[in-house]
Amino acid sequence: MEIVPQQPLDAVAESLDLATYVGEVLRRNRSLQAMIAAWRAAAEKYPQAIALDDPMFTSMTAPASWSSDDVNPAYILGGSQKIPWWGKRSLRGQVVQAEANSASMDIADARLQLTQAAHLAYFDYYLVDRQLELTSANIQRLDEFRVTARRQFEANLVTQQDVLQAEVELAEAERRRIELVRLHRTAVARINTLIHLPPDYPVLPPPASLAVDGLPSPPELLRQVALQQRPDLASMRAKLQADSASLALAYKDFYPDFEIVGLYDRFWQPTSTQGALQGQVGVNMNVPIYFEKRRAAAREALFKLRQQRAEFEQRMDDVNQEVESAYAQVAEMRAIVELYETRTLPAADQNVASARNDYMANRGDFLRLITAQRQLLLLQEKHQEAIAGYLSRLAELERVVGGPVPTELAAGSPD
């Protein structure tokens, strides 16, 4: 059955909204739905773990007694209920509850990873669309250069080589556009795949620009935030709680469980002294005398707890390193974006304008003009790559931190 996208992913909106797209990715993802179902199944284990065993009903009869003239009909009716040692049911509940909490944190971690994948697909889609736009503008400008070169050639001011050079540059630009069309198609397919749609389903265009605002808070703060809100760490904490309860439960197995028994025994023959003995109450219990088996179980639970604690501490170290690395990459890309916007691109624009004016005034050659234009296009593409790279690394930092990243305003920005 084909899934039709809901508003505002259709043509009513002007561009593909990032927040809406990410929301649809999370809503439609089948793996995430499977994890949610598994978590709900795990949560249903708690009432099972703390429940008592079903009571047992016992009945017995002597068939011959029902047709005998010498004795009364003989039968036994009884019931029993197993009662575990105090605290065992509670500990079993703690184990399964902690396991369910761990499963819920695994879902949160999967949502973070899926959110990052959606962000990366969205930024790649934005980048290839901007590159197509830049290439189209470059082709238009190169066509203008070709017209100018032909006029200069017809006026015997330059040689035919300028016209031929313009044709070569135009052909190379067309080749680049063909390549970008393929990349655009691939980006659209990736967008659609994440929202469970056919690869060639129509997709709204990305926005014309994406904001690059501020820097994340200092890494010292981000590390603290990550240790508090990372869902994978929370999942491991829940597993630690489960292992701690399992260890306590293993020690509880050194104590016996009980079974309360009640019987009404009509096998007793009615005499003056036996009638009061037909009702009986008793207690059964296991005798935990095989201590080595229980000691081994306790040691096993203890070693699992130590393993889980060591893995948790190692994971904390890994998280600190991941935050530091991701922050450094975000800061690097933010500085590169600022460099392009404040120095590189303005200088490249002026270089093209200067080369064109000199060529029109017959003071410069065509190769210098073409080289300046080629350099400008390259720098414009790298500028867009830096914007997409910054936002992609910010999405990575968001996953590493475990949620929204607190940011600081860029220098000179209004409060």
Image: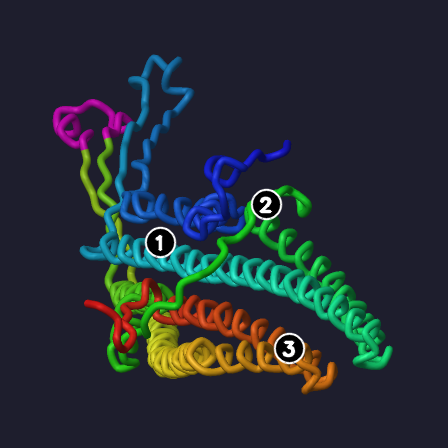
Seen in the picture, residue 316 relative to 253 is either above or below; the reply is: below
Q: Is the magenta stretch mostly helix, strand or loop?
A: loop
Label 3 sits on residue: 356
Q: Which of marks 3 and 2 is nearer the N terminus?
A: 2
Residue 8 in view here: yes
Label 2 sits on residue: 203
Label 1 sits on residue: 100
In 3D space, how far apart are the residues under numbered discs 3 and 2 (Cα atoms)?
A: 39 Å
Amino acid type of the residue that numbered disc 2 sits on in the rendered structure: Val
- The residue mark sitting in front, 3 or 2, is 3
- In the rendering, at what x and y percent does residue 149 appear? 77, 73
Depth check: 68 or 79 in front? 79
User: Quarter of the image holding residue 121?
Assistant: bottom right
Amino acid type of the residue that numbered disc 1 sits on in the rendered structure: Ala
Depth check: 158 or 32 in front? 158
| Contact? badges 3 and 2 (CB < 8 Å) | no
Residue 310 in view here: no
| Residue 337: in magenta span | no
Left or right position of 342 against 51: right
Quarter holding the C terminus? Answer: bottom left
Quarter holding the N terminus? Answer: top right
The image's mark for residue 83 is none
Q: Which colour scheme is used?
A: rainbow
Looking at this rendering, what residue extends furthest in the front direction? 155
Residue at the image position 28 percent from the left and 43 percent from the top: 51
- In the rendering, at what x and y percent does residue 319 appear? 37, 78
Residue at the image position 17 percent from the left and 32 percent from the top: 277
